[in-house]
Image (tube, rainbow, N blue to C red):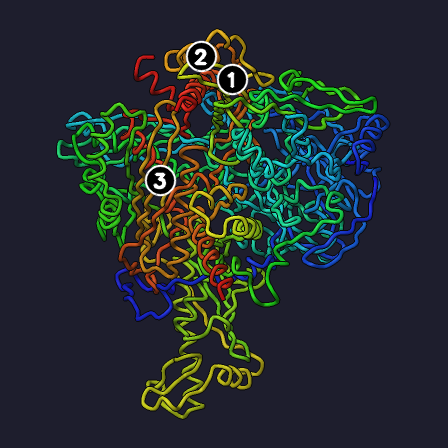
């Protein structure tokens, strides 16, 4: 079993961990760094629960080998809020009632963050298309769509200040 | 003697609510949105090992030999278990027909043959690969239609013909009605194998102490009730089993009693260390407890004005390799819908059979969904024959408040008429039917349609444990005046934690911040059955009504001593007891709570509540007697476009209109309705767990077992009609299952409206539609 | 099982040298196919050569009057690249239909070809546009037409020690119209049941050049032959016949995504749709 030292930045902090070459990024985040907000729903990149941002792009961390994250900047759900102040996307998810069981929520929120960075004023279609990689079985997506729209407004208002 | 008020005396009135009926984000939403919520698969205990099971690759085979020696020698492996080296008993929630580890025979692909505990999952995987099992494959039953045939392989010796249950419930002289009726209609329908697809797979973490007590941290909807089943499986007294229910990632019925929890506990017992035993997604597909597939033969009789005279149904149900809750689910499919329509004569018969496939179980609707698909398709056919509008036929026959059906069930609040009429109005149903009729006569390759189906489900089905009925809530106010809510109707994402918090906040005039609903722990919470059968809101808020009143009385009594004012002059306001005559005189809950703790040294103030739904009786041997205190109603509507060149269906919009009595949290109710309709959309159009001829599932992954994504689901309109269920304190009925039930037949009816072809089995895929269109057009 | 050796070369030279030395080396690019397959297949042992750090593989640039797209270019970049969108729009479109946003952020255009799945989306427009593949090994570089690259499901023309460097695409002549249809069970996050790419050049309503490539209806992508006979014909009159030729060329099987009959019908219809779109 080969090991390797991995240096990367997680939620703004430099990390240096010893990992097995067969570990996924999701595993390292969860088991080595205790960032349990990254959920594993299928392990095969088909449900999106493990979505994190890697160098600013959303990826399914169960399909990324940990060693591939060398030098990368990772943002997990734990890194979104600023202290006790929620990220506007998080705030919008709470307010819109977009969360039920919550297991898809971290991945869904991070996909929304990536979506709004690319499309600050997303169309209906861009919202749907941007979230196809994140399965939710509770909400029927309606309140998630509302949350995305609400978050876009919040971000726009914040930026205008 | 029962403490319950007699049925005739029960009639709660709507209160003057301030918080109940408003829109509240979930109280646990911030933890969930920040990733702080610890789910079952996140739990780690000191010294914890990992468990994995070796599963049968054969649908039906005799186990000749298992060699675990190589696995046992692998470094990091703590123990290797097989059916031969552990103490266990056959268990099952209804029929005791399953071992935790197969002893001499496996009955489906996925059946557990051996299990290991090791330091990590990788070592477990490797250990499993080192276990050598010698099988003698046996002929398998892979279709429910073959199960009862002569010469079919026998799966369980105790159940000849592979029949687990045969039910027959005749009410009235049906043949005479069929002979004399103006119109008799017959049809056959098949509801497919649907997987719940919660995003967190099944699992649990188990730990034993030295006195032989086990604690299972489990993703489970029925903590207290399932202890009984798990105790049997583990062959220990029930008091040795404690279940703690942390937050978990969705259930939809699958997470009632299930193999994974006691098997994890069994592994932990032998490992003598805590063990996390969670399924991966492929295993969850293989051996979760998906929906019971059913075949229906329906025959109904009508007069010329559309009066529903009689209904006969014959069901064949496939429970897979082990019975799970199949019997109760089949019974539900037989007759639950009979509380929505006034049909005087109803006959139902069912055979529940074993096959060598995944055991099937509870899934949103509990057999009633399957029946609605058949029945509400059937009723549209009848409406067409009789030249009636689909809603008119239903409205002609729906139940009314106080209706007592032939099974002895009594409907109390019934707003089905309002649901149907609102659904018709909101969707512009009749206007669209006319418009689409003209449009569909044009050459366009797109055909449009709109369809509806009303729906009903219980709200708090009676218990299966005679004579227990009902539910309980225990409130505890600590010395700082904070209230803790103990209840056995757990939150699985449906929001009951928020519902209970809202009831306390409303009745005790207390801030949400001062109310906590801890994770249910069977050592602490009152006895209860859990969240299934749409029990949560109806049972828990029923009990809550009494508990808050109990606590209110105590608060006022102590405040009266502190303020030296008569109790009649006191009321609750903003976390304090306040004088009505002089509002400047008040005392806050912390002070009252502290006085309680001092007057009764150390004792926290309790609010005790229990609730037995009025008029509910355990069924007699003829399955007669009311099964539920409340019945929830709804009407679902779907508008579709069918591409006649590809068979693809585009759903433009869906409507879910519901009667849930008094709404508690409108935001959560909308979420339930939208989620239910979306899940029903999947069942109707996409989802089908399919088996190959080798008895293996061919689509055990999310790429091939397709559930709807964000790109599939159209706009879903959710609306509640005015209603109050007077049998329960806050007047609330549950929504959980009813919101799933009507949409599949509504979609079916919409597709028929578009293309004039009806589909008798689910799912209605593009491929099936195209084939049917070609056949219709003689191609 | 579960043993992985990991190499992350920084240059093509290092990579091909590793490929020649390491036993049964597997190239890791986006990983979206390989890692998923590895997990589904009981964590077989792998010697990984991760090529994502090789800058040369992620270029999109003009070379020798053609467009070169490095094998390591991720799908999201294919979708957004101006040159690709302008000159090879259906390649960008096909890339936008691969998996989900997360998958497209990882998956590479080279991986989509090297994985050699019959349903691969980007392969169809690449073949239709006449792309060549550039293959490198320790002994140098060779080129072949992408349409000859596929040898069967999961099998390519890559020999031991070779890796895909990128694709070289000739710029389409003026008036060329590309069309792409991905027919799948659900609108997002799915594999194609049938994929069709057409590249057509019309001259005053008459066909001056035509290329049709079919996906998911045979062991390898099908570059439909025998369409030259339609050159000079009116598109309106010929399209049904072309669709017929394409349908005959398809060799679909029945699987979990669709039956061969349905697939066959969808080939006919999708080709017709593409051709109809081409003449608009």
Closer to the observer: label 3 or label 1?
1
Position of the C terminus of chain B, as image quadrant, is top left
Give the residue furthest to the left.
B305
Give the residue furthest to the right.
C21
**Is there any visible trace of residue C252 in the rendered image?**
yes
Mark 2, chain letter? C
Query: What residue did someone put label 2 on?
Result: C242
Q: Position of residue B740 (x, y in %)?
A: 39, 43
Identify which residue is drawn at 30% across, 33% down. B749
Query: What residue did someone put label 1 on?
Result: C212
Q: B724 or B635: which is nearer to us? A: B635
Q: Position of residue B561 (x, y in %)?
A: 43, 90
Identify which residue is drawn at 63% across, 31% down. C109
Position of the N terminus of chain B, as image quadrant, is bottom left
Q: Tag on residue B743? A: 3
Local secondary structure at mark 3: helix
Q: Quadrant of residue A134 in the image?
A: top right
Query: What's the CA distance linking mark 2 and mark 1?
Result: 9 Å
Q: Position of residue B324 (x, y in %)?
A: 51, 39
B216 up-or-down from B161: above or below: below
Q: Residues within 10 Å of mark 3 (few under 14, many from 20)?
A: many
- On the picture, is A78 further left or further right than B743? right
């Amino acid at each position: 079993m080969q090991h390797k030292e991995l240096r990367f930045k997680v939620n703004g902090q430099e990390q240096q961990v010893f990992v097995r070459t067969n570990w996924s990024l999701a595993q390292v985040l969860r088991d080595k760094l205790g960032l349990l907000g990254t959920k594993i729903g299928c392990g095969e990149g088909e449900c999106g629960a493990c979505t994190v941002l890697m160098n600013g792009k959303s990826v399914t961390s169960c399909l990324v080998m940990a060693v591939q994250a060398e030098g990368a900047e990772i943002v997990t759900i734990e890194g979104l809020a600023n202290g006790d102040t929620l990220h506007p996307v998080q705030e919008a998810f709470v307010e819109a009632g977009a969360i039920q069981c919550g297991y898809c929520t971290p991945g869904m929120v991070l996909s929304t963050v990536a979506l709004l960075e690319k499309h600050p004023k997303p169309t209906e279609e861009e919202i749907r298309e941007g979230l196809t990689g994140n399965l939710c079985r509770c909400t029927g997506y309606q309140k998630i769509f509302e949350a995305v729209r609400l978050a876009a407004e919040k971000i726009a208002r914040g930026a205008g200040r | 003697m029962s403490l319950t008020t007699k049925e005739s005396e029960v009639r709660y009135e709507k209160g003057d609510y301030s918080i109940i009926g408003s829109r509240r984000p979930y109280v646990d939403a911030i933890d969930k949105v920040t990733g702080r919520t610890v789910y079952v698969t996140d739990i780690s205990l000191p010294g914890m090992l990992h468990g994995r099971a070796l599963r049968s690759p054969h649908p039906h085979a005799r186990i000749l030999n298992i060699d675990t020696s190589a696995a046992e020698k692998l470094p990091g492996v703590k123990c290797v278990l097989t059916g031969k080296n552990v103490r266990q008993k056959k268990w099952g929630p209804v029929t005791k027909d399953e071992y935790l580890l197969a002893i001499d025979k496996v009955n489906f692909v996925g059946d557990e043959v051996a299990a290991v505990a090791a330091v990590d999952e990788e070592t477990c995987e490797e250990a499993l690969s080192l276990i050598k099992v010698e099988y003698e494959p046996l002929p398998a039953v892979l279709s429910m239609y073959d199960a009862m045939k002569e010469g079919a392989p026998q799966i369980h010796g105790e159940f000849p013909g592979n029949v687990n249950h045969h039910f027959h419930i005749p009410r009235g002289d049906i043949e005479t009605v069929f002979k004399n009726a103006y119109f008799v209609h017959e049809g056959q329908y098949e509801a497919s194998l649907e997987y719940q697809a919660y995003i967190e797979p099944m699992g649990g973490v188990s730990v034993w102490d030295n006195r032989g007590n086990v604690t299972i941290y489990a993703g489970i909807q029925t903590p207290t009730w399932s202890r009984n089943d798990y105790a049997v499986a583990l062959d220990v007294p029930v008091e040795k089993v404690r279940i703690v229910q942390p937050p978990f990632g969705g259930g939809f019925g699958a997470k009632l009693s299930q193999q994974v929890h006691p098997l994890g506990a069994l592994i932990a017992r032998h490992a003598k260390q805590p063990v996390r035993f969670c399924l991966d997604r492929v295993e969850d597909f293989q051996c979760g407890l998906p929906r019971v597939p059913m075949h229906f033969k329906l025959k109904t009789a009508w007069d010329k004005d559309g009066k529903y005279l009689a209904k006969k149904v014959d069901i064949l149900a496939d429970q897979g390799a082990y019975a799970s809750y199949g019997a109760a689910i089949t019974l539900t499919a037989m007759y639950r819908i009979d509380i929505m329509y006034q049909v005087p004569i109803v006959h139902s018969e069912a055979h529940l059979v074993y096959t060598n496939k995944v055991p099937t179980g509870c899934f949103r609707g509990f057999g009633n969904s399957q029946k609605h698909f058949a029945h509400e398709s059937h009723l549209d056919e009848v409406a067409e024959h009789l030249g009636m509008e689909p809603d008119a036929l239903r409205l002609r026959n729906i139940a009314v408040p106080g209706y007592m059906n032939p099974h002895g069930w009594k409907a109390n609040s019934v707003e089905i008429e309002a649901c149907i009429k609102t659904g018709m109005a909101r969707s512009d149903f009749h206007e669209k039917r006319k418009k689409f009729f003209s449009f569909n006569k044009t050459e366009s390759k797109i055909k449009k349609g709109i369809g509806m189906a009303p729906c009903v489900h219980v709200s708090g089905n009676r218990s299966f444990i005679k004579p227990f009925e009902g539910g309980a809530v225990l409130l505890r106010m600590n010395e700082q005046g904070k209230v803790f809510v103990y209840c056995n109707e757990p939150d699985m994402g449906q929001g009951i934690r928020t519902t209970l918090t809202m009831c306390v906040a409303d009745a005790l005039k207390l801030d949400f911040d001062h109310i906590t609903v801890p994770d249910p722990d069977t050592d602490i919470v009152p006895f209860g059955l859990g969240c299934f059968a749409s029990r949560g809101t109806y049972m828990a808020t029923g009990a809550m009504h009494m508990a808050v009143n109990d606590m209110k009385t105590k608060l006022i009594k102590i405040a009266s001593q502190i303020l030296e004012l008569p109790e009649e002059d006191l009321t609750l306001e903003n976390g304090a007891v306040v004088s009505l005559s002089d509002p400047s005189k008040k005392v806050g809950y912390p002070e009252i709570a502290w006085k309680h703790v001092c007057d009764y040294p150390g004792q926290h103030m309790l609010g005790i509540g229990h609730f037995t739904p009025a008029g509910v009786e355990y069924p007699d041997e003829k399955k007669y007697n009311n099964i539920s205190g409340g019945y929830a109603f709804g009407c679902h509507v779907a508008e579709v476009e069918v591409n006649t060149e590809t068979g693809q269906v585009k759903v433009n919009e869906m409507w879910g209109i519901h009667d849930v009595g008094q709404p508690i949290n409108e935001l959560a109710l909308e979420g339930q309705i939208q989620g239910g309709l979306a899940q029903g959309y999947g069942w109707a159009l996409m989802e089908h767990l399919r088996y190959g001829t080798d008895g293996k599932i061919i689509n055990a992954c999310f790429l091939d077992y397709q559930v709807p994504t964000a790109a599939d689901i159209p706009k879903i309109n959710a609306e509640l009609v005015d209603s109050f269920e007077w049998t329960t304190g806050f007047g609330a009925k549950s929504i959980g299952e009813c919101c799933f039930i009507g949409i599949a037949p509504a979609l079916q009816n919409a597709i028929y409206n578009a293309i004039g072809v009806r589909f008798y089995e689910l799912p209605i895929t593009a491929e099936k539609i195209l084939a049917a269109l070609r056949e219709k057009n003689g191609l | 099982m579960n043993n992985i050796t990991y190499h992350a070369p920084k240059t093509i030279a290092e990579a091909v040298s590793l490929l020649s030395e390491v036993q049964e080396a597997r190239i890791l690019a986006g990983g979206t196919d390989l890692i998923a397959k590895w997990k589904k297949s009981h964590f077989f042992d792998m010697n990984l050569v991760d090529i994502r750090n090789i800058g040369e593989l992620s270029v999109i640039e003009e070379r020798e009057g053609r467009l070169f797209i490095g094998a390591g270019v991720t799908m999201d970049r294919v979708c957004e690249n101006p040159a690709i969108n302008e000159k090879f729009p259906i390649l960008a479109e096909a890339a936008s239909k691969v998996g989900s946003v997360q998958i497209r952020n990882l998956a590479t255009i080279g991986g989509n070809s090297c994985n050699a799945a019959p349903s691969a989306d980007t392969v169809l427009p690449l073949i239709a546009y006449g792309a060549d593949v550039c293959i490198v090994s320790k002994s140098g570089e060779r080129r072949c037409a992408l349409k000859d690259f596929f040898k069967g499901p999961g099998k390519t023309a890559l020999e031991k020690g070779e890796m895909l460097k990128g694709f070289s695409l000739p710029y389409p002549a003026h008036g060329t119209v590309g069309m792409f249809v991905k027919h799948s069970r659900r609108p997002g996050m799915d594999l194609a049941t049938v994929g069709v790419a057409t590249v057509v050049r019309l001259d005053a309503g008459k066909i001056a050049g035509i290329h049709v490539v079919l996906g998911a209806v045979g062991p390898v992508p099908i570059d439909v032959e025998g369409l030259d006979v339609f050159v000079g014909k009116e598109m309106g009159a010929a399209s049904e016949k072309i669709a017929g030729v394409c349908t005959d060329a398809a060799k679909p099987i029945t699987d979990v995504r669709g039956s061969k009959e349905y697939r066959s019908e969808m080939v006919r219809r999708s080709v017709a749709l593409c051709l109809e779109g081409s003449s608009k």
